[in-house]
């Protein structure tokens, strides 16, 4: 018996390292930002078993209220210890007591040094629960008369979630600012979290809010992200979030990773807040059915301007800085934006923006060509989705560069010149997208000396003439006579996936009476000097003069052919 105080002290020390969540963890990516957390207080249930409250909630149901409590037990002894027989009760400030039903999955005993979580739930047909002030373990001896009740342990409940919608759902939990690092109170984990991006995305199933959290492990050992979710709140409704990662997310000491939460929204719903809720599984003893019990722990406001990566000023042609945790672009692959143009499309009713990226394999072995999506956003926040060219080489050889083009359909009313260009990861949180780079840049103007940039080609038209001839069927056909200067950048691969030039002959009534596509690769590719393009496959029954020749760069995309007007010859 004399050794008991020493044993209790040792139990407390061990428990402090295993069951109590620290409150001084520092956000790994920002040493000046301290994670917000609340320490869990643990007490002796028996001489060896310590207890701490993980979560307490009293949330409204359709006909009343649901009471739920999760407690964490730790066996500090050296042998198996049974959890003492007990009832779990909650007391309210107005003197009411409720007995909760244990989950069928609750452990009856604990192995040495084992931590176990016990879940208790009860549904009552009243909404007048009041504020919960205490949780107690009560042993009831039914074999005596009258029965004898002994309180084994009573725990205060400083944090209780009362659920609801709107501002009422925020009562009893801490509210943080957007971007504050935090740990989840009561959860047995040393991981810290930080909000990095929040976007509304339109999908086949409707509007979805996607929230991205950066998880950091400041501890000394490997740790798995615990079960929790992020829910959305509007003024009068709540929307349940779901983690997009289906496999466990495990971090080594000092490691970081992203987790993503998709929140399905109703049309017209505007989010006001986000709630971080721990989740526990309750199994009813009578039916065996499992239910998820969510308890709000922290809240932060939905950003008025959708939170995400801040676009950095970018100079065209420079390597793009990517998110260091992104797995979309191989570390040995260098990506640069080489062109960004916006042009009208006569007769089409819209403009086309074209972005061209140079992808360079800087390693000594072949690598897969990265696949990313793009978005173009003007100064007013209007966003246009990019279409990637239809065919892209799958593998890039070392020491070479490859060109991948994206086109954006833009309304005629768009007059902006300064845009934000986002590169998106469509894999990590599929079917949703997350930002891996955000660039602030301006549209390019055509060169003043008449040189047209079609990276990796510079093209200059010295002369263009159009001739006509009549066929035996009395149809008119056309021939283009070109005098060009073409230069190409070195070590940039151009294959049959590269964009083409399309020459369209437009008569004085605005009709396209003939056209011809020309390539930069193959047997009949465009060359420097004089050449003739025969448009005999397209003919017209009428002859009209004068002609206008519209020269387009065309890119084949899954949505069709994108056209960029590069020159008008009259």
Image: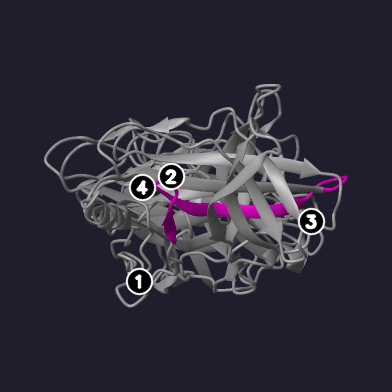
Q: Residue furthest left?
A: 364
Q: Which color mode does the image show?
A: one colour
Judging by the rendered image, the residue that carries numbered circle 2 is 73
Mark 1 vs mark 2, foreground winner is 2
Q: Earlier in the sequence, mark 1 or mark 3?
A: 3
Task: Please determine whether, in this image, residue 64 is positioned above or below residue 496.
Answer: below
Q: Which stretch appears magenta?
A: 41-64
The image shows residue 16 at horizontal and vertical percentages of 31, 58
Name the residue nearer the viewer: 316 or 188: 188
Q: Secondary structure at mark 1?
A: loop
CB under 8 Å between discs 1 and 2:
no
Q: Residue 304 lies in magenta, yes or no?
A: no
The answer to whether mark 3 and mark 4 are in CB contact below 8 A is no
Callout 3: SS: loop
Q: Which residue is mark 3?
A: 237
Which label sits in the foreground, 1 or 3? 3
Mark in front: 4 vs 1: 4
Dot 3 or dot 4, earlier in sequence:
4
In magenta segment, residue 50: yes
Mark drawn on residue 47? 4
User: What residue is shown with label 1?
Assistant: 315
Quick one: label 4 or label 2, which is nearer the N terminus?
A: 4
> Which residue is farthest front?
145
Q: Residues within 10 Å of mark 3 (few under 14, many from 20)?
A: some
Q: Is residue 335 above or below residue 307?
A: above
Which mark is first along the chain, 2 or 1? 2
The residues bearing labels 1 and 3 have C-alpha atoms spaced at a distance of: 45 Å
Image location (x, y in percent) of residue 470: 64, 33
Circles 4, 1 touching at the beta carbon (< 8 Å):
no
Left or right, 243 with reference to 358: right
């Amino acid at each position: 018996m004399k050794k008991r105080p020493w044993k209790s002290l040792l139990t407390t020390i061990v428990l402090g390292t295993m069951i109590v969540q620290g409150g001084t963890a520092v956000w790994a990516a920002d040493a000046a930002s301290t994670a917000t957390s609340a320490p869990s207080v643990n007490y002796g249930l028996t001489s060896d078993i310590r207890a701490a409250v993980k979560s307490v909630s009293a949330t409204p149901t359709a006909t009343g209220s649901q009471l739920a409590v999760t407690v964490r037990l730790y066996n500090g002894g050296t042998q198996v210890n049974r959890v003492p027989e007990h009832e779990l009760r909650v007391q309210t400030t107005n003197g009411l007591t409720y007995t909760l039903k244990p989950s069928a999955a609750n452990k009856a005993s604990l192995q040495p040094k084992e931590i176990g979580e016990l879940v208790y739930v009860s549904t009552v047909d009243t909404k007048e629960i009041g504020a919960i002030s205490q949780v107690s373990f009560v042993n009831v001896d039914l074999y005596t008369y009258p029965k004898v009740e002994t309180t084994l342990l009573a725990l205060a409940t400083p944090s209780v979630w009362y659920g609801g919608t709107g501002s009422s759902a925020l009562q009893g939990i801490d509210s943080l600012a957007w971007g504050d690092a935090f740990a989840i109170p009561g959860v047995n984990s040393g991981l810290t979290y930080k909000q990095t991006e929040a976007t509304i995305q339109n999908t086949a199933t409707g509007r979805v809010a996607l929230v991205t959290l950066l998880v950091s492990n400041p501890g000394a050992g490997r740790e798995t992200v615990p079960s929790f979710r992020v829910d959305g709140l509007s003024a009068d409704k709540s929307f349940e979030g779901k983690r997009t990662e289906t496999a466990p997310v495990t971090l080594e000491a000092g490691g970081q990773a992203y987790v993503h939460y998709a929140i399905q929204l109703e049309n017209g719903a505007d989010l006001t807040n986000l709630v971080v809720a721990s989740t526990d599984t309750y199994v009813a003893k009578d039916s065996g059915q499992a239910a998820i019990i969510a308890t709000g722990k922290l809240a932060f406001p939905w950003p008025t301007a959708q939170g995400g990566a801040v676009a950095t000023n970018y100079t065209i042609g420079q390597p793009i800085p990517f998110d260091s945790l992104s797995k979309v672009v191989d570390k040995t692959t260098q990506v640069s934006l080489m062109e960004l143009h916006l042009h009208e499309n006569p007769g089409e009713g819209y403009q086309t923006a074209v972005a061209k990226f140079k992808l360079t394999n800087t390693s000594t072995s072949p690598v897969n060509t990265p696949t990313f999506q793009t978005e173009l956003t003007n100064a007013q926040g209007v966003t246009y989705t990019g279409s990637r060219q239809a065919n892209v080489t799958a593998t890039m050889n070392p020491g070479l560069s490859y060109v991948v083009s994206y086109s954006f359909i833009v309304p005629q009313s768009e007059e902006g010149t300064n845009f934000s260009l986002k590169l998106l990861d469509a894999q990590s949180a599929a079917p949703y997208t997350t930002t891996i780079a955000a660039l602030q840049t301006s549209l390019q103007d055509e060169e003043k000396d008449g040189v047209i940039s079609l990276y990796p080609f510079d093209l200059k038209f010295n002369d263009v003439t159009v001739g006509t001839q009549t066929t035996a069927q009395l149809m008119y056909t056309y021939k283009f006579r070109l005098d060009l200067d073409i230069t190409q950048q070195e070590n940039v691969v151009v294959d049959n996936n590269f964009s083409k030039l399309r020459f369209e002959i437009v008569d004085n009534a605005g009709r396209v009476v003939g056209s011809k596509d020309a390539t930069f690769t193959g047997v009949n590719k465009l060359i420097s000097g004089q050449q003739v393009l025969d448009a005999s496959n397209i003919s017209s029954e009428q002859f009209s003069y004068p002609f206008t020749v519209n020269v387009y760069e065309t890119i084949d995309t899954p949505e069709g052919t994108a056209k960029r007007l590069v020159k008008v010859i009259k």
